[in-house]
Every structure is written in C-alpha cells, then in structure tokens.
Image (cartoon, rainbow, N blue to C red):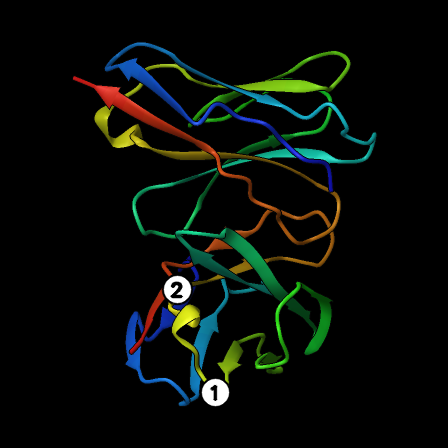
Amino acid sequence: KAGVTQTPRYLIKTRGQQVTLSCSPISGHRSVSWYQQTPGQGLQFLFEYFSETQRNKGNFPGRFSGRQFSNSRSEMNVSTLELGDSALYLCASSQSTGPDTQYFGPGTRLTVL
Amino acid sequence: DAKTTQPPSMDCAEGRAANLPCNHSTISGNEYVYWYRQIHSQGPQYIIHGLKNNETNEMASLIITEDRKSSTLILPHATLRDTAVYYCIVRVANNLFFGTGTRLTVIP
C-alpha cells in the first residue's frame, strides 16, 4: 500500500505571495492532519480534516487554511507569506478521527525569501 | 494532552539495546503513549504505541510503568540507521503534540 505523498517536495516563494500544498493520504484513510516544523518551534499541529470537515485547529493565524476533497486528498494554503513561514510542512493520515495512528508523508520544504 | 519529558540526547553503541525514557506524570486514564522518530528532515515515522500493557512489534518494545507515569522505548539491537530524534507523545485527540524529543546517536 502506498504511503502518504506530498507535492511539491520543495518550494521557494517570496514574501506576500501565497502557496498551496497538496497531500494524498494512504488509501482508505479518511483523516488528514497538517503540521508545521521549524527549528525554533519544533513540530506544531495546524489542523485536521475528516470527511471534508475541519475537526481540529491549532493556534495559527487565519492566513493558514485548508480543505479536504471527497477522495480524502487535502490541500493547505498559506496566504500573504512571511519569512517566518519558512518551514517543513508535514501531512499525516489516519483511518479515522480520534486516537488513531497517524502516518506521515515526507513533507514539503517551503522557503520564503 | 499530557506533557512529556525526555532527555535531550543519548548515545548508544551499535548492536546494543537503546533504552529511551519518557516521563508523562499527568497522563489521563484514556491517553495513549505513542512513539515516533524522525530522521533528519524526513517525516516522522511511527514506531509503537500502548495504553497500559507492554507492547512489542518488529521495530521496538514499549514498557509502561504500572502507574503509567513513565515509559521506556527499547530498540533491542541498535544500528546506525536508528540514529534519529525520538518523540514520546501522549494523546487522546487526533492531533499530536510533539515535544523536543531525544536525539539518539548510535555509535559504531
């Protein structure tokens, strides 16, 4: 069974631009969570989607948003990029919402110049 | 979610067992203990999880104390490829709260 895939793997943007990242979960998994990892803050939870609905949200500004499609694929969007948004963005999928094991993708490395 | 405390770094000789401790003294009765590891700049890899009983899989063993306030992840025969940051997480909701983890270095 294929793992979680994320595209693109690397991305360079400039301040003020917006970006969309994509995540395809493991087949059969309906929950997708997003995390941001920076050297200073470590791994932080952004939000979780299940059945096309946002179920949980971390403490991030409204510039960070996401959505989930009927096939469970998910996208996250960051608008008006800031230098501090440079990070590794990780997507994780699980079969359901709740305390279920999450499996991570390789991440998208975003650099904001 | 309960907080966890892990030593920032540990060394282990190749071929020996690596024992990684984790304190979670405020854990609730329905919170699971999960272990993940992250090899440099890759996505975290699931290792093992447990609630009350000790668990073992092909990667590792998880020993949880009777009072559930601490646990130990055991890699029985550490290899150089086990060098990574290991995260101990306790959770009941579906979002994981990662601490700073333990950087394990396996030495040849």
What amino acid is at disc 2? Ala
- Residue B100 placement, left or right of A62: left
Residue in the picture at 69% in, 69% down: A50
Is A72 situated left or right of A5 in this image?
right
- What residue would you read off at disc 2? A87
Q: Which residue is mark 1?
A: A80
| Residue A31, picture quadrant | bottom right
Q: Counting residues from the N terminus, which is met first, the one under dot 2 or under dot 1?
A: 1
Q: Chain of mark 2?
A: A
Within-10-Å neighbours for mark 2: few <14, some 14–19, many 20+: many
| A78 to B61, vertically: above or below | below
Asked if disc 2 and disc 1 are in contact, CB closer than 8 Å, the reply is: no
> Is A26 left or right of B51, judged from the image as shown?
left
Can you give x and y, in whole percent of width and height, for residue B71 in the image?
61, 19
Number of other residues with Cα within 10 Å of mark 1, as a class: few under 14, some 14 to 19, many 20 or more: few
Q: What kind of element bears circle 1?
A: loop
Type of amino acid at the residue the image marks with label 1: Thr
